[in-house]
Amino acid sequence: MKNKIKHSLPNLLTFINLSLGIIALLFSIKDDLIQASLLVMVAALTDRFDGKVARMLDSTSELGKELDSLSDLISFGVAPIIIAWKISFFNLGIIGYLLTVLFPIAGAYRLARYNITTFNNVFCGVPITIAGAFLSIINLYNSFSHIRHSYSNINTIICAVIIVLLSYLMVSKIQIKKR
């Protein structure tokens, strides 16, 4: 029994990550974009620990790795871009849709590439967790700008450039050493 709990703890953290991403999506549907952005950042904290806990408890598994990737796609690929779409791209038509699709596609590609690569303490491309958390910080800033009625077209342009850049960095071959 004790062994079963030990092996379930990393997956529990992964499911908390996934739950926070889904709740962030629900908050964004209700236009509570500040709460949604904050939940993505909290999800990043839980994602930081699921792998560490799995290695510490010697309970890593292929199932856990796949669950983590699926959760990351929701929490850091889908949730932050939907928030950004609601803030910045809602009225841009096809350009807004293309920007919104680009980010999670790049994140899914990066996650799939990671899952089939032998890990040697070096990431290839920026991890989706970092990209999604960074986009959530941008979303948080833009949400506050909306509240203060100081949001402008330049915010939309900057957000679009950041999304394209983050998408490129996720699929790039840039190597990042894990600490």
Image (cartoon, helix red, strand yellow):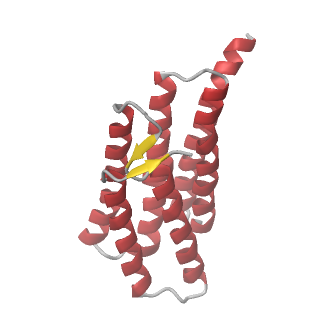
Front-most of 175 and 79?
175
Q: Relative to residue 127, is residue 58 depicted above or below?
A: above
Residue in view at x 38 percent, y 33 percent: 115
Residue 12 in the image, given as x and y percentages of width and height: 64, 31
Residue 25 in the image, given as x and y percentages of width and height: 52, 54
User: Residue placed farthest to the top in the image?
Assistant: 1
Residue 134 in the image, given as x and y percentages of width and height: 51, 63
- The reply, left or right, for residue 32 in relation to residue 112 is right
Front-most of 44 and 75?
44
Q: Relative to residue 67, is residue 176 depicted above or below?
A: below
- The reply, left or right, for residue 173 in relation to residue 88 is left
Q: Quadrant of residue 11?
A: top right
Q: Quadrant of residue 17?
A: top right
Q: Relative to residue 40, is residue 162 depicted above or below?
A: below
Residue 77 in the image, given as x and y percentages of width and height: 43, 52
Residue in view at x 67 percent, y 23 percent: 57
Residue in view at x 58 percent, y 62 percent: 37
Q: Quadrant of residue 46?
A: top right
Front-most of 48 and 36?
48
User: Residue placed farthest to the right in the image?
Assistant: 2
- The reply, left or right, for residue 88 in relation to residue 40 is left
Query: In the rendered view of the protein, which quadrant contains the N terminus?
Result: top right
- The reply, left or right, for residue 150 in relation to residue 77 is right
Residue in view at x 58 percent, y 34 percent: 51
